[in-house]
């Protein structure tokens, strides 16, 4: 029996697939579609970041997706298995800095290498649909979508605390600020209030929660989703800080407990924290809180910490003054970033 020599056999078939465009799936109105409509199937792995060369993790991920695509084709389904590159953002920026090349150049070089390896691995991709998120013909549509959201008031700007590297003078993503220092230069990360863009996802909380009941997902994934979407049934109650003349809405599922509220807590990201108190102790606490992940901060068993802000708000039901704190177990992503505490 002859030994299987991949470098002899595989390029031959890869050439046939390329010449015959075996994995291309035409749209309904295009030639080659044939008019018949078998069961349709869409196989999409997470798109790679073109910030370096493919590694074993890529091979693992795309080999599994490829097996699924082939399995469905064998069952007679029309399988769309496209490929693209998630080219904007920090990995691409870091790659350009590391290689000292223009990001456009280093990104294109990385994409060429992904393309070459996908072909040599024999992954069954419809190359006629290849895309890169940095290409104008792609991002004109993300811009178009953004403008529709903006016109509807669903995209808006607001002050929010971000992680900031004073040496690089740039905002850092969570992944770029490991253990409270900038991954590029090692400078301790600071909190800064900057205007940020947000989507008004909370407007759709009820619809999202309802539809979550209809999907066939594992329980822990659904719980995670439910926590992200946030609570939807309850009441918004306003606490006023008279010293600053600012109203703080809080969302509560138990408005009946209002009389028992003994203190008031803001999330470290809340835009007013440093306005209420910018002492070193508060700044330090906020900086540390921002260095921790939201998942860690939300853990039930995590020890609760906080710093007094030296201000009070008025409990709307009995006029009582209750002290304000900043504490990292309150997350800005959920609700209003402020809670009343009922022990
Ligand atoms: Zn830095």
Image: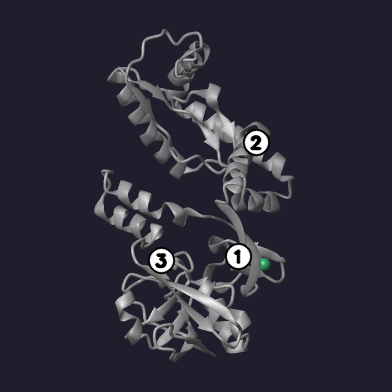
Q: Quadrant of ligand 1?
A: bottom right
* One can see residue 201 in this view: yes
Give the x, y percent position of residue 230. 38, 61
Identify whether 67 is placed above or below 328: above
Q: Is residue 263 left or right of residue 159?
A: left
Q: Secondary structure at mark 2?
A: helix
Q: Quadrant of the N terminus?
A: top left
Depth-wise, is mark 3 or mark 1 nearer the camera?
A: 3
Q: Is residue 229 left or right of residue 283?
A: left
The residue that disc 3 covers is: 295
Q: What is the quadrant of the C terminus in the image?
A: bottom left
Q: How is colour applied across the structure in the image?
A: one colour
Please tell me whether mark 1 or mark 2 is closer to you in this view.
Answer: 2
Label 1 beta carbon less than 8 Å to ligand 1: yes
Ligand 1 has an atom within 8 Å of the beta carbon of the residue at disc 3 = no
Residue receiving disc 2: 140
| Up-down relation of residue 219 to residue 15 (above or below) | below
Q: Earlier in the sequence, mark 3 or mark 2?
A: 2
Q: Which mark is residue 259?
A: none
Label 1, label 2: how far apart the Cα atoms are: 32 Å
């Amino acid at each position: 029996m002859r030994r299987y020599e991949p470098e002899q056999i595989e390029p031959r078939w890869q050439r046939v697939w390329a010449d015959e465009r075996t994995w291309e799936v035409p749209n309904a109105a295009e030639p080659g579609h044939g008019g018949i409509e078998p069961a349709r199937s869409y196989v999409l792995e997470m798109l790679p970041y073109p910030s370096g060369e493919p590694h074993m993790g890529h091979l693992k991920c795309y080999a599994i997706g490829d097996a699924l695509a082939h399995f469905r084709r064998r069952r007679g389904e029309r399988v769309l298995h496209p490929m693209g590159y998630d080219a904007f953002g920090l990995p691409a920026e870091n790659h350009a800095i590391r290689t000292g090349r223009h990001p456009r150049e280093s990104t294109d070089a990385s994409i060429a290498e992904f393309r070459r390896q996908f072909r040599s691995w024999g992954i069954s991709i419809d190359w006629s649909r290849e895309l890169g998120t940095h290409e104008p013909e792609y991002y004109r549509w993300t811009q178009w979508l953004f403008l529709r959201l903006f016109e509807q008031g669903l995209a808006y700007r607001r002050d929010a605390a971000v992680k900031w590297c004073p040496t690089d003078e740039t905002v850092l993503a969570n992944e770029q600020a490991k253990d409270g220092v900038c991954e590029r230069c090692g400078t301790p990360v600071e909190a800064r209030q900057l205007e940020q863009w947000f989507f008004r996802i909370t407007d759709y909380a009820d619809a999202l929660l309802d539809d979550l009941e209809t999907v066939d997902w594992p329980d822990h994934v659904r719980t995670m989703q439910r926590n992200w979407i946030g609570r939807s049934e309850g009441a918004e109650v306003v606490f006023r800080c008279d010293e600053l003349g600012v109203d703080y809405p809080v969302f509560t599922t138990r408005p009946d407990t209002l009389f028992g509220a003994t203190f008031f807590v803001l999330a470290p990201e809340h835009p007013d924290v440093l306005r209420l108190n910018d002492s070193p102790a508060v700044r330090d606490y906020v900086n540390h809180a921002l260095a921790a992940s939201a998942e860690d901060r939300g853990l039930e068993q995590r020890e609760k910490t906080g710093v007094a802000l030296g201000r009070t708000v008025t409990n709307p039901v009995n006029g009582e003054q209750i002290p304000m704190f900043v504490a990292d177990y309150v997350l800005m992503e959920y609700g209003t970033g402020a809670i009343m505490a009922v022990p």
